[in-house]
Image (cartoon, rainbow, N blue to C red):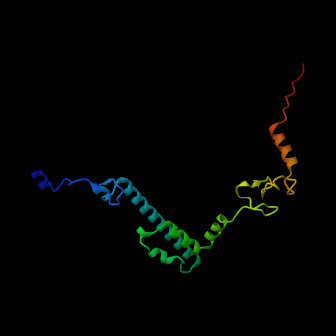
Amino acid sequence: MESHNETGCQAPNGPILCINNCGFFGSAATANMCSKCHKDMMLKQEQAQAAASSLESIVKGSSIENGKEPVASEILDLQVGSVDAKVISTELSAGSSSSMDVEAKVNEGPKRCASCQKRVGLTGFSCKCGSLFCAVHRYSDKHDCPFDYRTAARDAIARANPVVKADKLDKI
């Protein structure tokens, strides 16, 4: 017991539960958290730092291009621990027009037949002409398809069956 007093190290009184109340035991090395909670906390901090640094680079890049004060300058005043990736993406999309174009492409709306504008959803048929059609207009003769099936078939046959000619031999 005297060796403990000399070195200043003390054995813990008992097992320490995780401070997140997950039911596992924590340690002082992981800030009284279990390994899973500690790893999750570290991952959130890294994501927040990455988001803050990317946001800072975006803001600095836009201020150089425009020569104006950036729209999202108040975002940088947030603390790193409280930055949320969803908050950053929504605030950036409100500030820049290029990200609004990306969101518009993602949220185009329901898929519709190119002939009758009927909603097709997951049951739509895509044609070789590049359009989407309902079950009634899926055939090429029903929607006046501009795709030339005849030349496509000829090309496919020509690629599948190349002409094989033997070399001519000199006759003796």
Look at 85% across and 28% down and name the residue there. Answer: 167
Look at 54% across and 73% down and name the residue there. Answer: 91
Q: Is residue 164 above or below residue 153?
A: above
Q: Quadrant of residue 27?
A: bottom left
- Percent position of residue 153, x then y: 85, 44
- Percent position of residue 134, x then y: 78, 57
Q: Quadrant of residue 142?
A: bottom right
Going by the image, does 85 lie left or right of 26?
right
Outermost residue, bottom side: 68
Going by the image, does 150 lie left or right of 135?
right
Look at 88% across and 53% down and name the residue there. Answer: 141
- Percent position of residue 55, x then y: 50, 69
Query: Is residue 25 or residue 48 the one in the foreground?
Result: 25
The count of marks equals 0
Q: Is residue 127 above or below residue 75?
A: above
- Percent position of residue 2, x then y: 9, 52
Outermost residue, right side: 171
Query: Is residue 85 or residue 46 the one in the foreground?
Result: 85
Outermost residue, top side: 172
Query: Is residue 63 or residue 170 the one in the foreground?
Result: 63
Image quadrant holding the C terminus, namely top right
Look at 80% across and 55% down and name the residue there. Answer: 129
